[in-house]
Image: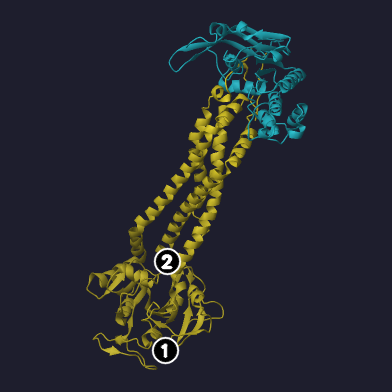
Chain colours: A cyan, B yellow
Amino acid sequence: MSAALEIHDLKKQFRSPGGRTTLVVDVPQFEVASGTHVAVRGESGSGKTTFLNLIAGILTPDTGRILVNGIPVTGLGEADRDRLRATTIGYIFQTFNLLQGCTALENVELAMTFGRGADRDAATQLLKQVGLSAHLHHVPRQLSVGQQQRVAVARALANHPSLVLADEPTGNLDERHAQDALKLIRELCGANGAALLLVSHSPSVLERFEQVVSFSSINRAAVAQPQGVPA
Amino acid sequence: MSVTPSASEQGAGATLPAAHSGAAGVIMLARRSLRQHSLSSAVTMLSIALAAGLVMAVFSIRAQSRDAFLGGAGNFDAVLGAKGSKLQLVLNNVFHLESSPGNIPWSAYETVQEHPGVKFAIPYAVGDSYMGARIVGTTTDLFDKFEYRAGRKLAVQSGGRQFDMGLREAVVGAEAARRTGLTYASQFHPTHGIEQNEASHEHEEIYVVVGVLEPTGTPIDRVILIPLEGIMRMSGHILRTEDDDMYAAMPGEEIPDEVKQISAVMIGLRGPQAGLDLDEQFNKRDSGETLAFPIGAVMAELFDKLGWMVQVLGLVAILVVVVAGSAVLASIHNTINERRREFAILRALGARRSAVFSIILLESGFIAAIGAALGFVVYGGIMFVAAAVIQRQTGVVIEPWKFNPVLAWTPPGMVLLGLVAGLIPAAKAYSTDVATHLAPQT
């Protein structure tokens, strides 16, 4: 059985408006086994989001190879990368990124329409699982931040992904809600058999994981570009 | 619609699962956005409706009035009247507009009548009116020989009859009856002159309505027909002999032909050659009369003169369309920046660029489609007002819902316009960079 995520020699650099190039991601080797939960410790600005966006196919690397569930993301065209995101990858953001005009139910259903097909019953069931059965028809601004993140978690799992990417998922939550959200993410990933790759700088989050790696240990660019160096 | 994964681009044993097109999501998001921006959507729809209504009305009225004026003469081919403008002759005697250029002697009528190429000649005497409806003195030939449309002769509504040439009787056009209130057996005093003003006065004679015409949709609907001699014998009407001697007709006394005067002769021809003959006879020689032939050509000339006005109207309509299209573009374009994040989120969820593009096109197309549908309301409004005015002024009946190709191509044209106007904002949405618009970077 192939790994949920395999990375080889991944490099991504950005060009500043001044023409300077900065290497942001340089990951020679990284792997997440199917169904496992891996936490990555990384500070803000270390290139974590870029790393996750590369895995999700939102950004394309300069060089290297990424395989999600055995599928080479780096060999796919844009439309197929979209399809991969829609069907195989769930993405949870620090800022939730819910559609503000849509209800909780619509947010989950909408994700389904681009993936494995809209299924109102399944969406309702998912929201029940995350404890929002009383809030199906509430729009995000009618929900607490904790509830909003739970909608986002349900949405990420809506298409039964084999890999869930979570980018500081508890960053906007207080300690109690953070622990609840984390528990929920791990429970749902476990129930769906999805692998979880979570990045965070919060010790209380990281201590819950059996597998914790430091981003600087896998990303050579993060070591080469420590914070505080004048531009 | 699901997409089948293509094997070539996948690794060994790994399959890229099929995904739905997201059409349901696209429709839902387009609808939600229209609702969210309901005021600007409604205003934009209204501008499209105005544009569609105006375009349809301008082109429909133009086509219908052109048909009505060019074909309004029925089977009259020519008009003979006093020397002057052919257009005035036609407008006065066919459309019952303007004033008569003057009188011609009875002998002119006889000359026309005797020409072998003339199928029929009907004398008209005009100049009186009743409550704004013009009175035309004529003969019963008008009922028997005139066809206002191919094969359609004037018909008196049931219960009525044609007037008796020797009596003070009148047959009233449908529109004239409606406006004056004259019905079968009504009595009235004709007014001298075609307008009711301080200078006009009533004639002593009392006329009795013996029939009301079935509506024809032509200018004849607006007039009151009485026997030709009734005009000549009307109190205060002075006839003149060719030597300019005055003659006032006395009751019971036959009017000698040499003093009879009429306003015009309405002529039906057997063929165009007869028209050329008469043209030679009256126009090319110094005859004192003018022949307007062919009537259609005279009216076409008028339309050519009015052409610039029609073109200006058409131009205004097109400009309104351009403005409406720009309104669609602007109203949707304004929402794009605030929605960048939404598009980025959708893309992160796996929506393709084309899905985001479709959302915008769907919105602009929908606005245009609803606007075009509402355009028929605007069109109906304009047409009913315009039809009423045109009928009152000219007697020409404009049918608001008469089919014109413009009614068929305007709605799809407006939808196309909406889609084209949506292209620029859609392209902007299409090009949204996902990574930069998703969220604050960590």
Question: Which residue is located at x 49 percent, y 75 percent?
Answer: B179
User: Is B289 displayed left or right of A195 in the figure?
Assistant: left
Q: Amino acid at mark 1?
A: Glu
Count of marks, rendered view = 2
Q: Earlier in the sequence, mark 1 or mark 2?
A: 2
Can residue A171 be seen from the camera position used here? yes
Which of the two residues, B128 or A52, is positioned nearer the viewer here?
A52
Q: Residues within 10 Å of mark 1 (few under 14, many from 20)?
A: few
Residue at the far left in the pictured view: B286
Residue B214 in the image, given as x and y percentages of width and height: 52, 73
Image location (x, y in percent) of residue A34: 71, 12
**Residue drawn at x 43%, y 61% as measured from the top left:** B65
Q: Is residue A117 visible?
A: no
Q: Nearer the viewer, mark 1 or mark 2?
A: 1
Q: In terms of image quadrants, where is residue B141?
A: bottom left
Asked if labels 2 and 1 touch by Cβ distance under 8 angstroms, the answer is no
- Identify the chain of the residue marked 2, using the numbered disc in the image: B
A150 over A206 or under it: above or below: below
Quarter assignment of residue A32: top right
Q: Position of residue B334 (x, y in %)?
A: 51, 37
Q: Which mark is residue B72?
A: 2
Q: Residue at x 50, y 53 (%)?
A: B53
Vertical side of B58 occupied by B270: above or below? below
Image: B252 above or below B416: below
| Quadrant in the picture for the N terminus of chain A | top right
Type of amino acid at the residue the image marks with label 2: Gly
- The residue that mark 1 highlights is B204
Question: Mark 1 belongs to which subunit?
Answer: B
